[in-house]
Image (cartoon, rainbow, N blue to C red):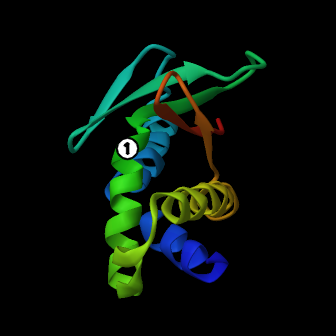
Amino acid sequence: MKSTSSKTAAQVSREEIFQAIGYAALKARAGYLAPGTVIVIGSFDLVVAEDEAGDGIMVQAIVQKKQIETLALAKLGELDAAVSGWTDQEKAQWMASFFVELREVLRKWQGIEMRQGPGENLTLQKSVNM
């Protein structure tokens, strides 16, 4: 399971939402955009916000967790046709492993932090260094 979750995380990390966050961070840095500014890239609305420490800014997007799960299952189906025979418990275990892998891939390779919430959503954020 670990191998497929790693490969799937790498593929999902290349999806449009993650590219949009990187591009929005560049726009925010180049335009010296103030917190509260909304950047629209494709179908995504990204917000410039202050970081938790209050000494910098970041770009944030809130996406439905279900949207990322759907992407993951589609990519997984391309990698491993046997997934169609998995039980709900096997899918849940795989999905938990996938999100751990995705979080690490995004942090390590794209500088994007992913955290749970609000609610059934995921918050994606990338620091804007100025």
Quadrant where the N terminus sits is: bottom right
Q: Residue at x 64, y 35 (%)?
A: 130
Q: At numbered mark 1, what does the secondary structure look like: helix, strand or loop?
A: helix
Q: Nearer the viewer, residue 116 or 20?
A: 116
* Residue at the extreme left: 43
Q: Position of residue 13 (x, y in %)?
A: 48, 63
- Circle 1 residue: 66
Q: Residue at x 70, y 62 (%)?
A: 108
Judged left or right of residue 124, residue 104 is right
Q: Residue at x 62, y 37 (%)?
A: 115
Q: Position of residue 41 (x, y in %)?
A: 27, 41
Q: Residue at x 51, y 16 (%)?
A: 35
Residue 125 visible in this rendered orientation of the protein: yes
Judged left or right of residue 98, residue 11 is left
Q: Is residue 58 above or below residue 6?
A: above
Q: Is residue 18 above or below residue 121?
A: below
Amino acid on which the number 1 mark rests in the picture:
Lys
Q: Position of residue 66 (x, y in %)?
A: 37, 43
**Residue neighbourhood size for the residue with mark 1, other residues' Cα within 10 Å, grouped as few (<14), some (14–19), many (≥20):** few
Q: Position of residue 9 (x, y in %)?
A: 53, 67
Judged left or right of residue 75, residue 124 is right
Q: Is residue 21 above or below residue 86?
A: above
